[in-house]
Amino acid sequence: MLQHRSGIPNFVDHPDFWTKPPKNKQEILEYALDLPADFEPGEDYGYSNTNYILISDLIDKTLGYNHQQYIKEEILNPLGLKNTFGSLHEVNIDNVMSGYYVGVEKDFKTEDTGLMLATAEDVGVFLRALNDGSVFNEGEQEIYSSIYVYEHTGLLVGYQSIAKYYKDIDAVVIQFNNTTNFDGYDWNLAEIVCHRIIKILRI
């Protein structure tokens, strides 16, 4: 699931997702489970946000307590990340950036999809810690490096982000956008802007 080779469908691919966004984790999983598997496990690659939700449930069962507590104790506190939160309920809603979907008047910032929220600064600190190894205990970096890359791109209704570390200029670049659309135009535009920013930073 971490490598997106599970074949578990991405809940955002459900035909009703963009017009009737799920209101909670249970509805998200129902959207995913309503779709056929993309492929046999291990046979292909297919990015799926559903993987992360299922992984969080597995961690909870393995730990015997909520994974958010573990993340806070093992990652957030040691790195001093005071502006990273386990859910929308932990945040002053006035401090959350509005999110828009082209053609829809609704502001999606109050939609709790069960995902974490963070400031660009906290994401940058975390990404740097992944790359310099300071977030890991002995032996953990080797395991993590074998299954995942130290960067992230993400897309939800109303929001999209690109977060990458560039070793040649020792810089973390975070791009948050609060407007999305169905045809991918905003995503493509964001990637173009991000590449131009990197080009400028390398001068």
Image (tube, rainbow, N blue to C red):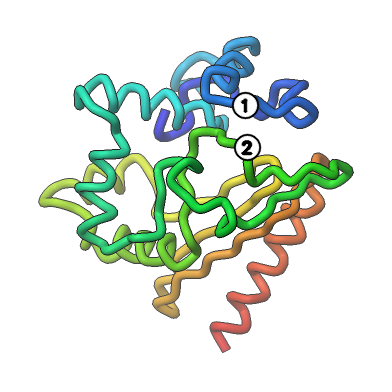
**Residue 132 appears left or right of 5:** left
> What residue lies at 28% left-to-right and 44% top-to-bottom?
71
Pick the front one: 31 or 51: 31
Examine the rendered structure and indicate whether residue 22 appears above or below residue 172. Answer: above
- In the image, residue 123 sits, relative to residue 1, either above or below, namely below
Of residues 150 and 124, the one drawn nearer to the viewer in this rendering: 124
Q: Residue at x 40, y 59 (%)?
A: 83
Q: Residue at x 19, y 46 (%)?
A: 140
Element type at mark 2 = loop
Residue 199 at what x, y percent from top left? 62, 79
| Residue assigned mark 1 | 23
- The quadrant in which residue 87 appears is top left
Dot 2 amino acid type: Glu
Of residues 139 and 110, the one drawn nearer to the viewer in this rendering: 110
Image check: 105 left or right of 152? right
Report the Cα–Cα distance between label 2 and label 1.
7 Å
Q: Quadrant of the C terminus?
A: bottom right
Neighbour tally class for label 1: few under 14, some 14-19, many 20 plus, Cα within 10 Å: few
Screen quadrant of the N terminus: top left
> Does dot 1 land on a helix, a strand or a loop?
loop
What residue appears at the point 59 percent right and 14 percent down from the top-left corner? 30
Q: Position of residue 135 (x, y in %)?
A: 23, 57
| View extreme (left): residue | 138
Q: Quadrant of residue 113?
A: top right
Q: Total label count?
A: 2
Q: Residues within 10 Å of mark 2 (few under 14, many from 20)?
A: some
* Residue at the spot of label 2: 111
